[in-house]
Image: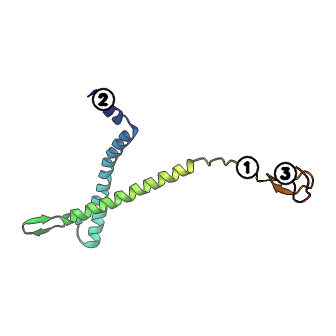
Amino acid sequence: MKKFFDEFKEFINQGSVMDMAVGVIIGGAFKGIVDSLVNDILSPILGAVGGANLADKSISIGGATLGWGNFITSVINFLIMAFVIFSIVKALNKAKDLMKKPAEETPAAPTTKICPYCRSEIAIEATKCPHCTSDL
């Protein structure tokens, strides 16, 4: 039983769990902002263009009321959240790429050398110059 609690303690103390918890909390707060944007700004604009507020739209079928307007509002909420999250992730990735220092390139090993007698460029493994036939 002690091993189980030790493993649980290690799991909770991992950085990824804390990151996820912070993300969920911020996501919940962000949802309120997006809901307000859709309900207080976009829906009235769409209502003015379309002649009605989507959140109030519903249909009754066999005694059951289907709130299709609320569903459309939820879809709009989702699309706005997805777009904003995509934009934030894209901006963070761009910032991370800009902050990366370019890796220092190590020069490639030379493949040729200069013959000390005729000054011709020859293969580095050569033991005799093909131009002047000198022993190297």
Residue at 35%, 42% (x, y): give it. Answer: 22
Answer with left or right where residue 95 lies relative to residue 121.
left
Q: Which of marks 1 and 3 is in front?
A: 3
| Secondary element at tag 3 | loop
Q: How crowded is mark 3: few (under 14 residues within 10 Å), some or many (20 or more)?
A: few
Q: In which quarter of the image is the N terminus?
A: top left
Residue 108 percent location from the top left of the image: 71, 51
Residue bearing the label numbered 3: 127
Which residue is labeled 1 in the image?
Answer: 109
Residue kind at label 1, given as amino acid type: Ala
Q: Which mark is residue 97?
A: none
Residue 20: give x, y in percent of width and height.
35, 44
Chain-order first, disc 1 or disc 3: 1
Rounded to the nearest angstrom, the CA distance separating label 1 from label 3 is 18 Å
Give the residue type at disc 2. Lys
Q: In this view, does 96 lie above or below 3?
A: below
Contact between marks 3 and 2 (CB within 8 A): the answer is no
Local SS, label 2: helix
Q: How is the image coloured?
A: rainbow
Callout 2: 10 Å neighbours few (<14), some, many (20+)? few
Secondary structure found at label 1:
loop
Q: How crowded is mark 1: few (under 14 residues within 10 Å), some or many (20 or more)?
A: few
Please name whichever residue, 57 or 4, is drawn nearer the observer in this view of the structure.
4
Q: Which residue is drawn at 17% across and 64% down?
A: 67
Identify which residue is drawn at 79% across, 51% down: 125
Sequence order check, earlier mark of 3 and 2:
2
Q: Which of the two marks, 3 or 2, is nearer to us in this view?
A: 3
The residue type indicated by label 3 comes to Thr
Q: Mark 2 points at which residue?
A: 3
Q: Which residue, as the protein is rendered here, is positioned at the far bottom? A: 50
Q: Foreground: 98 or 59?
A: 98
